[in-house]
Amino acid sequence: MNFELSTEQSKARTGFREFVEKYIAPYAAEYDSREETPLELIKAMADAGYLGGLVPVQYSGKERAQMDALTWGLLCAEVGHVSAALVSLLTVQSMVIQTMTKWGTEEQRQRFLPGLASGELIGGFALTEEKIGSDAKNVQTTAVIDGDSYILNGKKRWLSFGQLAQFFLVIAQVDGKAAAFIVEREREGFATEPIKGLLGFRSAMLAGLNLNNCRVPAENLVGRVGFGFSHVAGTALDQGRYCIAWGSLGMAMGCVDSSLAYSNERKQFGVSLKEHQLIQEMVADMVTQTQASRMLCYKAAFLRENKDPSVIMETSMAKYFASRTALKVASDAVQIHGANGCSNRYAVERHFRDAKIMEIIEGSNQMQQIIISRYAFQNYQAIKTALST
Ligand SMILES: Cc1cc2nc3c(=O)[nH]c(=O)nc-3n(C[C@H](O)[C@H](O)[C@H](O)COP(=O)(O)OP(=O)(O)OC[C@H]3O[C@@H](n4cnc5c(N)ncnc54)[C@H](O)[C@@H]3O)c2cc1C
């Protein structure tokens, strides 16, 4: 496994940094307090090729090459450095793109991928419901076949950028078997309502989705009936975890940066904070854990590029560890900033609120623990070999 970036990856990261510094960093706190992301910023991200970064070239209609897994991770980390909400935009868009690329029909790919690549289309992912979250196999939204269409009924909740998405990938039950459907905003019986007042991810423009006898043509079924959770949502969630792992890494890096700068300049008891050993202890743990997150993210990227079958488990591990680290590091960063860390004049305050959400989305950390431990028990010999090399 190589930790060196190629010239192209290094160049791409420099570009991401410049973009983030110019277009996101100065405004992230304001968007958070307004609980919205302006369309101009989304357009700028789209024009830079970020929203459609994972669309295969044959559908993007542009000269721009599809990003490799590591480059995509670097993008999520750079954006995560300043805005978790915008990581969630990259996350949900790429979840839809990956799913459509893998499970969509050629007609569906032709219909949606060019718009997702250019950013003219924002896609949403609608799995969670009021009563069903982690137990996602048992969603209650139904789809009933009627001639050459399906009629959907149900209520989805907590949908990132659901206020803006022009269509959703909706997971529903067809005769007790999970299936995924493309449901466009203009369909009759489709309504969204904004969700405000969140702890974090405030500018992620969440919405609930109500489907009331919403009819979609049979060609909007993605994959087969029965594949909705295991295959379609499975692909989406794996991609989501990958983005959240990298976004959490970026957030931890942002908190480390602020804490180093602050403990350098802030003086108490006649010396700067960095001279106090208890501050040094916190910084040592923050840096070490962030570096360990980075290793897991790089490993997940490496396995992705090599299409290694262990990638799903390793991505869960990266998401689990990196999101826990982000929360711990953000909490210590607030501690180091004292009262200033409790004020929205300092980004660590927002990072702390956002970090908690990293532990919940794309499968809560308890779900990741279940996945990882199940894998460990089922693959005991493989794990033993991996740990002893
Ligand atoms: C900001 C934000 C954005 C989101 N975006 C989307 C989106 O775009 N699309 C979408 O579909 N969903 C989205 N979600 C929903 C998210 O995926 C769910 O919140 C998550 O899956 C957890 O489900 P839940 O909130 O219903 O918690 P629950 O499933 O009710 O769980 C509550 C608690 O119990 C724990 N728990 C549950 N089952 C077990 C178990 N078997 N063993 C041990 N502990 C358990 C959980 O880990 C959690 O701590 C979003 C949520 C947030 C906050």
Image (cartoon, grey):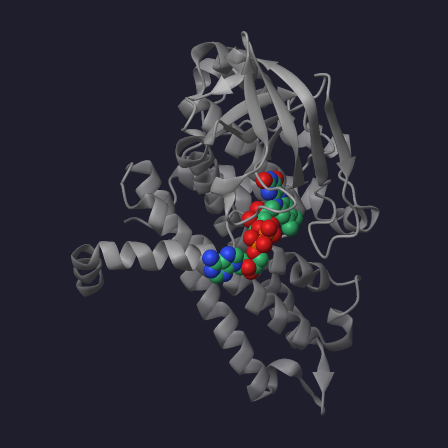
Front position in the image: 285 or 85: 85
x and y, in percent, of residue 203 in the image: 74, 45
- Where is the C terminus found, in terms of image quarters? bottom left
Q: Residue at x 22, y 63 (%)?
A: 387
Visible residue check, residue 297: no
Number of on-image labels: 0
Q: Residue at x 41, y 22 (%)?
A: 224
x and y, in percent, of residue 68 in the image: 41, 34
Side of 308 where 86 appears, left or right: right
Residue occupying the far front of the picture: 175
Residue occupying the far bottom of the picture: 269
Q: From the viewer's perspective, is residue 32 above or below residue 38?
A: below
Q: Residue at x 54, y 44 (%)?
A: 76
Q: Quadrant of residue 345?
A: bottom right
Q: From the viewer's perspective, is residue 54 above or below residue 20?
A: above
x and y, in percent, of residue 207 in the image: 72, 38
x and y, in percent, of residue 113 in the image: 53, 18
Residue occupying the far right of the picture: 34
